[in-house]
Amino acid sequence: MPDAAPEEDVSKDASSGDALAAQELPRVADSTRNTYAGATAEFLRYLWCKKPQLLTPEYKAQFQHEAADLVADNAEATAEAVPSVERLRKALPRLRVGGGLGPDPLQWDQLTADDFVTWLLELKDEGRLSKSNMQQKRCAVANLFNDFNQRDVFEKVAKEIMVLQKGLVQQLAAAECSEGGGDARQDKPPLPFDLYQQLALAFLEDSVAENGHCNGPFGHLFFVLTWNLLCRTSKLGCGDILWQHLEWHDDALAVFLPQSKQTARAVEQAGYPDARHVYANPLNPEICPILSLGVFMMCYGVGVGGDGDGRLFTGTKQYDRYTKVLKRVAERRAEQLRQHGLTPDDLGALSSRGGAASYSLSDSTACPSSAAVGLRAGWVPSGVGDADKRYVPAEERYAGRCCAGLPLMSPDFMILHPFFSRYHDDGSARAGVDAMVSDGVARAFGGDVPLRLMPVAQYALASVLYHWDFLARTLPPRHRLFANALLLDAPRRQELQQLTMCVLGNSAHAQREQRVVTGLSAEVMIMGAMRDAARARSEAAALAAAVQRLNSGLEDRVHAAVRTLAEEGLITSTQMTVQTVSSAITQCLKDSGLHALVSHLKSCASVAGSERAAAAVSSDAPAGPVNQATADESPATCVRVPPDWKLPAFKAADAWRAWAVGVDKYGPYRSLQGIPQSEKRSWKRYKGFMAIVEKCITSAQGAAVDWSTMTDSKAQELYAAARGEIEVDGASHKRRHDQLKWNTVLKNYESARAQRNKLARLG
C-alpha cells in the first residue's frame, strides 16, 4: 500500500483551518473542481438573494466596492446589488489558492437541508435542473464545506439532503415519463453478462486501431477489472491502481484500492475489506482478468521504477482514454447491442460495475449476499440495519469467484488458475523448474519485476502460455504481444508451455502441487464429490462390460496354457508346484488385458481423489486402512478364502512353504484375505510365527527376503539355513525338530526368548 503523505507542523492559530483544508485539496481533481465552481457560485448567489443572513459579513464585504460602482454607473441600481454568478465564480479560486482560504462565506451551522432543497426546487421551476446535474450540485456544496474544514457540519444535514434529493429525482423521472419522451430508467442500464463476454472478446479482436495504435491491452484490462473489482473508473478507482497495490494471496490476485472521500468514514465503521480478490477464469479466457493482466504486462512491462509514476495505467486521464476505447468498441458492435435492446449511447464507464453487481446477485439463489457485494463495490451502507453489515473475508472471496464468471452451479466453480507444475505425474519433483520460470519472467517482463510482484508475474505468465492457442487465434497479427522477447523464442515458449497446468481444487494434482483453493461454498464441494462418484460408477460399469467380454474366452486360454506346460515337461509329478501354475495363469490374465483394465480402474480412482478406493479396487477389499502384509502384494495374487476355511496343522517347515509359495489351491498364504472369525486367533499367531521366521532368515542371509523371485526350492533352502535359530529345544518336547508342528515351535521359541530376557535382567 502507498505510504501516507507526511503531516506538516501546523500551529494552532487562525491559519490552522486553512492549512487543514489545503491538505484536502489534492483529493479533488482540477477538472472536477472547475465543474464544482459553477454550481457553488450559483448556490452562493441564491443565498445572497433569498437568504443573505446565511452569508458572513466578511464575505459580503469583499464585493461592496463592486456594488458601489454599480450604483454610480446605474441610477436604478441599489446598494443591495448582487454580484453575478460569473463574478462569484471568479472569486472562488482566490479563496483556495495563495496560501489562504479567505473569510468563511457561510454561517455553517445555520444552513439546513431545506435551504439546499429549496434552491433545487427553484432551479426545477426554471427548467434548469435535471437528474444528471442534481448529484453534481450536492457534491459541489459538500466540497465547499470540505474546503473550509467543515465536513462534520455538513454530515449532520447530508442524510436529510439525500432523502429529499431522492424524492426530487423520482418526481423528475415521473414528469419525463408522463410527457412521453423520458426513459423509465433513471441510470444507464447494467451490462448483461453475455454482452459482457461479447464486448470483452471485441476488445481483444479490435485491439489495433485504424491508425495502428494498439489500445486493446489497456482497454481489455480496464474493462474486466472494473467488472471484477466493482470499482469506479475515474478518480480513486480503477485508473488510480498502483503496481504496489497488487499482491498474490493463495489462488487470487489481491488488489488494494485507494479509499474515496465518500467512503473514508464508512470503511472505519462498516469494516470494508483491505483487499478485493480477483480470480482467474480459465473456462472463458476472454473474460479472465489474470490472462488480461499477463497480456498487459508483456506488452507494456512493469512500470514501477525509472520515469514511471508507479501506476498500473500510466497517465492522469485514464477515464477519458477508456471511454474513447469503449465507445469505439461499442460502435463496432452496435448490432450485438441492438439484440439486447441497447445502443452505444446506453453504455457508460460504470455499466460494467452495475452489470457485475446485478450478475453476482441474480445468477442463483446460492449467490453472495447483498451485503458482500455492496461492501466489495464500496457502497456506503445507509440506514440502521445496514450499519450492522461487516466485512467477512470468506464472503468477499466468494463474491470474487462469482464476479469472475465461474459457473456457480458446477464443480468447475472450484477451478484453479493456470500455474507451472513442479511435479511429474508419478509424484517425483521436476528439476530446474524454478530457474526456468525465473528466466521466463525476466525475458517476458523485462527483468525489472520487484520481488513482491514476482508471484503475480509468474501466474500471469502461466495464464498467457496456457491460453497461447486462444490468443494466437483471437488477437490481430499486428498486436504488440507477438513482439515479446519470450514469445519470439519458440523453443523456450514451448518448453514453458509444457509445464503449465490448470486443475480443479479438489483434484489429486492440486494436492500434489500443494495448491490452496479459496472462496468456495459447501454446495460446490458436494457437487464435486457427486460428480466424482458418478464418474467412478461410469468407469466401473465400463470395466464390468469389458471384463464380461474378456471372460468369455478366459477359461479356454487357461486350459491351453496348462496343457502347454504339461507338453513342455514343466509339469511332472515331482516338479509341479502351485507357483508354476500360478505364474502361467497370471500370464494368461495379462495377455487377456484384464490386468490393464484393473490398473486403469485404479488410476481412475486415484484421479477422483480417493487413494483408499484405488487400494480397495486392487485388493478386492473394502475401502479402509490397508495392512502392510497385503500392500506389498500384486493385485492378481490376492485370494479371499471361503467362510468355512480352516488353518491346516502344518509342520514348521511346511508352514513357511505355505506362507512363501503356497501348498494348496489358495497360493501363498501371505496373500490370503477374508479369514473367518473362528480362525482369527490362530491366524494371528501364525502371522506372528512367520514374522519370526522371516526375521531369522533375514539375519542368516544378511538381506531381506525377495518375494518376486521366490520358488518352492528356494523357500526350503532359506528355512534350512535358519532352522537352528528357529527350532529351539523345548522343556517337554524331545521329538525330532522336523516333526514338530509350527505352533509347538513357536511356543518353544517364545519360552527361550523369555528365559534369555530374564537372564539379561538379572545379569
Image (cartoon, rainbow, N blue to C red):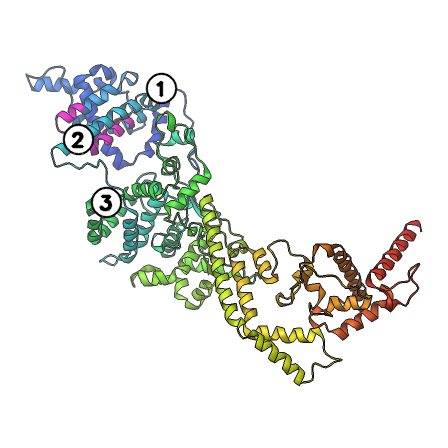
Residue that badge 2 annotates: 174
- CA separation in Å, label 3 and label 2: 23 Å
Extreme residue toward the front, this view: 644
**Range drawn in magenta:** 121-142
Whole-percent x, y for residue 268 in the image: 42, 30
- Assign a secondary structure to mark 3: loop
**Residue corresponding to mark 1:** 14
Q: Nearer the viewer, mark 3 or mark 1?
A: 3
Judged left or right of residue 677, residue 363 is: left
* Label number found at residue 509: none
Amino acid type at image mark 3: Leu
- What is the quadrant of residue 233 in the picture? top left
Q: Residues within 10 Å of mark 2 (few under 14, many from 20)?
A: some
Q: Secondary structure at mark 2?
A: helix
Q: Main secondary structure of the magenta part?
A: helix
Percent from the top left, x then y, of residue 711?
73, 73
Q: Is residue 655 above or below residue 75?
A: below
- Say which amino acid is labelled 2: Ala
Report, in whole angstroms, how far the alpha carbon at label 3 lies from the one at label 1: 49 Å
**Label 1 – label 2 distance at C-alpha:** 49 Å
For residue 347, the mark is 3
Query: Counting residues from the N terminus, which is met first, the one under dot 3 or under dot 2?
Result: 2
